[in-house]
Image (cartoon, rainbow, N blue to C red):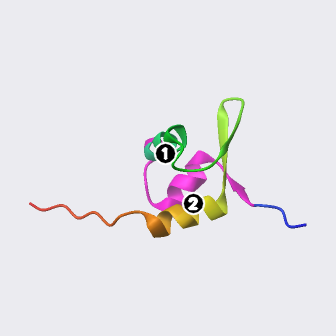
Amino acid sequence: MSAKKLLTTEQAAAVMGVSLRRVQELLQAGVLKGERYGRNWLIPESACTYRRRRAPKVSRKD
C-alpha cells in the first residue's frame, strides 16, 4: 500500500507556480482535487503535477 504525499495550499502553489489564492480558487471550483480538514486543504502531490502539466500556457500581448 503506497501513501499519497499530501501538500498544503502553500506547498501546492509553489509546485504549480501559481499564487495561494489561485490554488484556493481551483479547489473551490473543483478543478483541483483536494480534501478539506477543518479550515485547511490537503492536496495530493499528483494532482498538482497533473494540473501543472495540463494548465494552458498564457502569454500576455503588450
What residue is at 59 percent from the left and 54 percent from the top? 11
Residue type, numbered disc 1: Leu
- The answer to which of marks 1 and 2 sits earlier in the sequence is 1
Q: Which of 45 and 55 is in front in this view?
A: 55
The residue most toward the top is 38
User: Quick check: 43 above or below 45?
Assistant: above
Q: Nearer the viewer, residue 44 or 31?
A: 31
Q: What element carries label 1?
A: helix
Q: Where does the image place residue 49, in percent across and percent down from the top left? A: 56, 66
What residue is at 49 percent from the left and 45 percent from the top? 26
The residue most toward the bottom is 53
Residue type, numbered disc 2: Cys
Q: Do the residues labelled 1 and 2 touch (CB within 8 Å)?
A: no
- Relative to 37, 23 lies left or right: left
- Mark on residue 26? 1
Mark 2: few/some/many CA within 10 Å (<14, 14-19, 20+): many
Q: In which quarter of the image is residue 6?
A: bottom right
- Relative to 40, 49 lies left or right: left
- Magenta-drawn segment: 5-21
What residue is disc 2 on? 48
Which quadrant: the N terminus?
bottom right
What residue is at 48 percent from the left and 65 percent from the top? 52
Q: Is mark 2 on a helix, strand or loop?
A: helix
Mark 1: few/some/many CA within 10 Å (<14, 14-19, 20+): some
Spatial CA span between label 1 and label 2: 11 Å
Q: Assess whether residue 11 is covered by the magenta stretch.
A: yes
